[in-house]
């Protein structure tokens, strides 16, 4: 029995592969749009469904929204009057408070992370395309039904169902992309896939602000969810019709062909062997000649731990010191991202109530985030050829360090200037996601990639998605802006340190 090793080259990615990547990116857009829409419509939603904190808010019926309202208490809130005797401020649900933070964070994250591990395990064993398609359908249904919710607890249940649907996207799609693209294109492909985060997040501001303001058939925020659900139907159909399940570990496929003996030493080993052991000697010769190395020095199809599978292999992969420090850095970075994402709309409503941020945040997120992931993938793919996998960790550390002063500037300067700074922040800060998973995919065996990514996300999202809950108590201790200084640029800076430290364990 003989073997050869065939490898997909950079030019080996067909047009259908890139189309499939585009479809999976669109699916991710819909998932992230559904995920972050809550933060945009939380105020009108809370006022209709009655949850969260009360506060003195600008009266939406008067032409000019006064920033003075946020300094007043319940007894003095109605004392400011306009010329027509309408009150300048009203006491109403603000969209903030612990109810909102739980709905935004733990209610989503608890199911997202748990389901992600289960679905990641299923994806390692069964057809990943089918798994993602079914989960996209679940997300679509839950998102559409959110537009019909009548109380807070219905929102919680539908939010949890939405998160279960989205939980398949990153582990299953990342594994499929890893099998579709050559190593030299993999970080770029993962970066493009992760454009879905920024397009989805950015679109949530356009959909949440402008569709809610359009007040279609007097349903306000509800149509924001209905429109997103319609987009989900398209995403589910495209997955079913366009995307094909790639062969696993396709970047280094092993096919059976006769082995070649190229030295006298090899020939003597075969002829001296017992007849029953000849096949074993051929296999040893094959294995000694056909190790395909990645920049980490591991065999391309096996990760750092060899060709192992099962729960023990997952645990072994994730308990590597480099992976543990990488996970800590990712948790801190994720905390910064969620702290800002869940509070962006409400921050500007609090401090700059007259400024409509819809198009500004959408453009900054889409342009800055998309450039960031593309540049991060491109730069790390080039550097990894010279410096190995450590290069990707250097890119992670440098990008977060540079993003820190930009993030601080977003909170310091008023709009619209702060949005140009936000654009710069996104360009550097968002270089991280695709590069992070390119590192992880190189450190774990292909046989447990989906499960390993799912477990990694379980940890990262449970910490990064839940820690932002402390923004609420921290804002009472400091100020709302002060709390965001700590949780947004402050966490960028700390994550940069730990990304750099993780390079010492490789």
Image (tube, grey):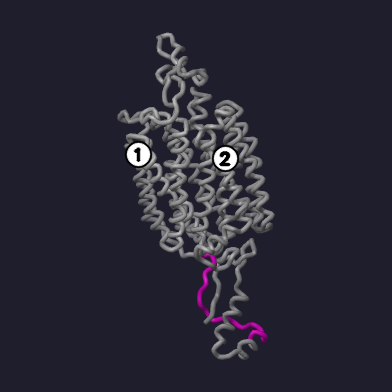
Q: Nearer the viewer, residue 19 or 337?
A: 337
Q: Position of residue 87 (x, y in %)?
A: 42, 14
- For residue 496, side relative to residue 55 (left or right): right
Q: What residue is at 36 percent from the left and 44 percent from the top?
A: 142
Q: What secondary structure is marked by label 1?
A: helix
Residue holding disc 1: 154
Residue 203, labelled with which disc?
none
Real-space Cα separation, disc 2 to disc 1, in angstroms: 29 Å
Q: Report if residue 196 lies within the magenta region.
A: no
Quarter of the image with the C terminus is bottom right
In this rendering, the answer to whether 343 lies above or below 15 is: above
Label 1: few (<14), some or many (≥20) within 10 Å? some
Q: Earlier in the sequence, mark 2 or mark 1?
A: 1
Q: Position of residue 85 (x, y in %)?
A: 40, 9
Q: What residue is at 64 percent from the left and 64 percent from the top?
A: 297
Q: Report if residue 265 lies within the magenta region.
A: yes
Q: Nearer the viewer, residue 59 or 428?
A: 59
In this rendering, the answer to whether 302 lies above or below 362 is: below
Residue holding disc 2: 336
Q: Position of residue 389 (x, y in %)?
A: 64, 57
> Can residue 22 be seen here?
no
């Amino acid at each position: 029995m003989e073997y050869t090793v065939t490898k997909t080259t950079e030019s080996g990615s067909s047009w259908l592969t890139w189309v499939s990547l585009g479809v999976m990116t669109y699916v991710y857009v819909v998932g992230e749009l559904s995920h972050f829409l809550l933060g945009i419509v939380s105020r009108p939603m809370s006022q209709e469904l009655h949850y969260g904190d009360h506060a003195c808010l600008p009266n939406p019926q008067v032409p000019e929204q006064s920033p003075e309202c946020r300094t007043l208490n319940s007894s003095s809130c109605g004392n400011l009057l306009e010329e027509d005797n309408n009150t300048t401020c009203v006491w109403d649900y603000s969209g903030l408070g612990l109810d909102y933070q739980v709905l935004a964070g733990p209610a989503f994250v608890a199911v997202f992370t748990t389901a992600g591990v289960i679905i990641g395990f299923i994806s390692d064993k069964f057809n990943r395309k089918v798994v993602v398609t079914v989960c996209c359908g679940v997300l679509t249904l839950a998102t559409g039904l959110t537009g019909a919710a009548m109380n807070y607890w219905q929102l919680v249940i539908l939010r949890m169902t939405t998160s279960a649907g989205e939980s398949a996207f990153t582990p299953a799609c990342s594994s499929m992309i890893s099998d579709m693209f050559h190593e030299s294109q993999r970080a770029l492909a993962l970066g493009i896939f992760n454009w879905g985060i920024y397009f989805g997040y950015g679109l949530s501001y356009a959909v949440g602000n402008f569709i809610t303001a359009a007040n279609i058939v007097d349903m306000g925020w509800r149509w924001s969810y209905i429109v997103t659900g319609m987009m989900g139907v398209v995403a589910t159909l495209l997955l079913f019709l366009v995307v094909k399940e790639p062969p696993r570990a396709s970047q280094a496929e092993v096919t059976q062909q006769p082995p070649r003996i190229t030295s006298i030493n090899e020939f003597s080993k075969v002829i001296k062997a017992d007849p029953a052991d000849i096949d074993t000697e051929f296999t040893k010769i094959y294995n000694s000649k056909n190790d395909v190395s990645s920049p980490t020095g591991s065999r391309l199809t096996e990760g750092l731990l060899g060709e192992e599978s099962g729960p023990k292999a997952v645990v072994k992969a994730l308990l590597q010191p480099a992976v543990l420090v990488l996970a800590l850095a990712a948790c801190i970075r994720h905390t910064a991202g969620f702290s800002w994402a869940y509070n962006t709309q409400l921050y500007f409503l609090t401090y700059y109530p007259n400024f409509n941020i819809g198009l500004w945040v959408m453009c900054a997120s889409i342009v800055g985030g998309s450039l960031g992931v593309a540049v991060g993938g491109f730069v790390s793919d080039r550097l990894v050829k010279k410096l190995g996998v450590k290069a990707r960790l250097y890119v992670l550390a440098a990008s977060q360090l540079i993003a820190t002063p930009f993030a601080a500037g977003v909170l310091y300067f008023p709009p619209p200037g702060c949005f140009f700074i936000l654009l710069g922040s996104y360009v550097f800060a968002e270089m991280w996601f695709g590069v992070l998973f390119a590192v992880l995919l190189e450190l774990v065996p292909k046989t447990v990639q989906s499960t390993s990514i799912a477990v990694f996300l379980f940890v990262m999202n449970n910490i990064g998605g839940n820690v932002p809950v402390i923004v609420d108590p921290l804002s009472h201790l400091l100020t709302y802006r002060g709390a965001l200084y700590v949780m947004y640029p402050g966490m960028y800076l700390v994550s940069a340190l730990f990304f750099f430290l993780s390079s010492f364990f490789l």
